Amino acid sequence: MFGMRRPLRRALSLGLPTAWGATAITYKMTCPLAQQDGLGARLVTSAVFFVVGTGLIQHVRQTLLRELKQARRVAGAAQSVLLRPLPPRVEGLSVAAAQLSADRGALVGGDLYEVIATEHGVRVVMGDVRGHGLPALGTVAALLGSFREAVHDEPDLDGVLRRLERALARHLRERHREEHPASGRPPDTPVAEEFVTVLLLEIDAEGGVRALNCGHPWPYLLRGTEVGPLARSEPLPPLGAFPLPTELPATHCGHLRRGESLVLYTDGAEDVRDARGRFFPLAETLTKAVHDHPVSPEQILRTVLRALLRHTAGRPTDDIALLVLRNQPPHRPAQGARGSDTCGHAARARPATTPGQPTTSPTSP
């Protein structure tokens, strides 16, 4: 049935304009009224051609709208595969994430994130590709694909970051070759303007946090009712702008203890402005979110997203991604001293036997 609809739809798309044109020509060639030079005859002829022209314009408009909707559905499906919904729990962490796209009505952005449990600890990436919309989708795919393999293979974060650098360079060379097939051998840096800010985190079984930051905003640490940056050290340049240095020592960021949360975000969450030109107060919004009582990652996410949409009147000018991680091991009945954590550090939880329901999906205003 579906295979029969396509030829019928194509026949209609070609047949309707042909029928409208044939009607106008037939009227002009055969109708006696169209051969007269009187004012009344000219008005009737003009009305006929106006109706025909309006019908053709409306038909073209409907066809373009159908193609646009189909393209958006395909792009949204592609991004939902790339930015696959995260499970609500990864090891001992509760997780929630979402994205707002700057392209009105689209689900496609240039932001990326992923959380994966490995034998080296829980590893997290948050990135922001220069630009937004469909052109950034290929870069997101290249980086996420590389990250999902490298986190299991590389024992240290610097190895993961170098794999991402190579994946980005390879992707840009291939894209340059496709866009300029007659230019010969592509240069080593085919698109000098292309770069990606990348933040890599590693959270071990005891809650220790290590990071490598290439031009990305540092996450906020939510400790009780206090909100502050996870680290204050100067990040490396964005990935792709300059080669990585020979030495890549990870930044030690202390411990993520029980009940504490990390809020990772792309710079659009702080750089976006309202109608009066004021930046969004992300730190103040997070402080209000945790002021009265402990909140879950989903509650933090909802609070920030609502405030962002109010601030931008539902029209953010940049892609925005948010990822909330909370050290919240599953509650277990007390069994004496066995299994307790007297230091208050994160206890590593075993993966659930049944998969959790996704808690996140790309969102558009």
Image (tube, rainbow, N blue to C red):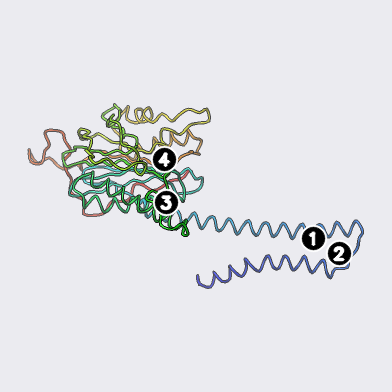
Q: What residue sits right under mark 2 in the picture?
A: 34
Earlier in the chain: of badge 2 and badge 3, it is 2
Q: What residue sits right under mark 1 in the picture?
A: 48
Which secondary structure, mark 4? strand
> What is the x, y in percent for residue 7?
56, 71
The amino acid sitting under disc 1 is Val
Which secondary structure, mark 2? helix
Query: Could you tell me if the residues under marks 1 and 2 are in contact, i.e. CB atoms within 8 Å?
Result: yes
The answer for how far apart the CA atoms under marks 1 and 2 are is 10 Å
Which secondary structure, mark 1? helix
Earlier in the chain: of badge 2 and badge 4, it is 2
Instruction: Give whichever of 336, 365 is nearer the camera.
Output: 365
> What is the x, y in percent for residue 173?
39, 54
> What is the x, y in percent for residue 280?
43, 30
Left or right? Give the position of 49 relative to 299.
right
The answer for how far apart the CA atoms under marks 1 and 4 are is 51 Å
In the displayed structure, 130 sits above or below 291; it is below
Give the label on residue 88, or none.
none
> What is the x, y in percent for residue 266?
38, 38
Give the label, 4 or 3, closer to the camera. Answer: 3
The amino acid sitting under disc 4 is Ile
Earlier in the chain: of badge 1 and badge 3, it is 1
Which secondary structure, mark 3? helix
Q: What residue sits right under mark 4 in the picture?
A: 320
The amino acid sitting under disc 2 is Ala
